[in-house]
Amino acid sequence: MSMFGHRRPRKFHHLYIYVDERKERLGAIEEKAKRELGMLPPGECHPENLRGRFVQGTSHLHRKKEKGADGFPPLYIGVAVLVTVLLLGLFWINGLLVF
């Protein structure tokens, strides 16, 4: 083992055995053509229509948005700042704290 010559692991490369790439490409071209011509049925499900649906359907993910950047709700941060200011004011008035 050398000090500077660390070997990197091989990258994972998986080849599918039972996949017909030509058939997939033709299917994608057909779907694109149908979409452009407006021939797709309205109830068909596409990945573009599914984006964000899971987050909207869950309640615990909405609570994370209400919290601040560090994970505390803004109310707790405001109360902590207010208590700190009041304590500093009391110490300054009593002469224990000199600026």
Image: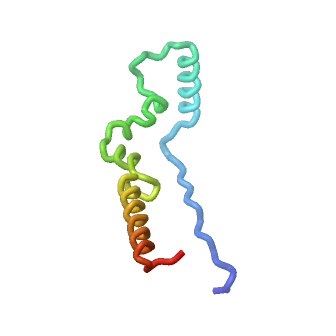
Tell me which residue sits at (40%, 58%) in the image.
Answer: 77
Snapshot quadrant of residue 12: bottom right
Residue 88, percent across and down? 43, 70
Residue 91, percent across and down? 41, 74
* Image-based side of 3 in relation to 21, left or right: right
Residue pushed farthest left? 59
Check the image and report above or below for 46 versus 91.
above
* Image-based side of 27 in relation to 82, left or right: right
Tell me which residue sits at (44%, 59%) in the image.
Answer: 70
Where's the C terminus, which quadrant?
bottom right
* Image-based side of 38 in relation to 85, left or right: right
Tell me which residue sits at (68%, 79%) in the image.
Answer: 5
Tell me which residue sits at (41%, 26%) in the image.
Answer: 45
Q: Nearer the viewer, residue 39 or 22?
A: 39
Check the image and report above or below for 39 versus 31.
above
All told, the count of numbered labels is 0
Residue 19, percent across and down? 50, 40
Q: Nearer the viewer, residue 83 or 11?
A: 83
Q: Nearer the viewer, residue 8 or 83?
A: 83
**What's the colour scheme?**
rainbow
Q: Nearer the viewer, residue 92 or 18?
A: 92
Where's the N terminus, which quadrant?
bottom right
Residue 27, percent across and down? 53, 27
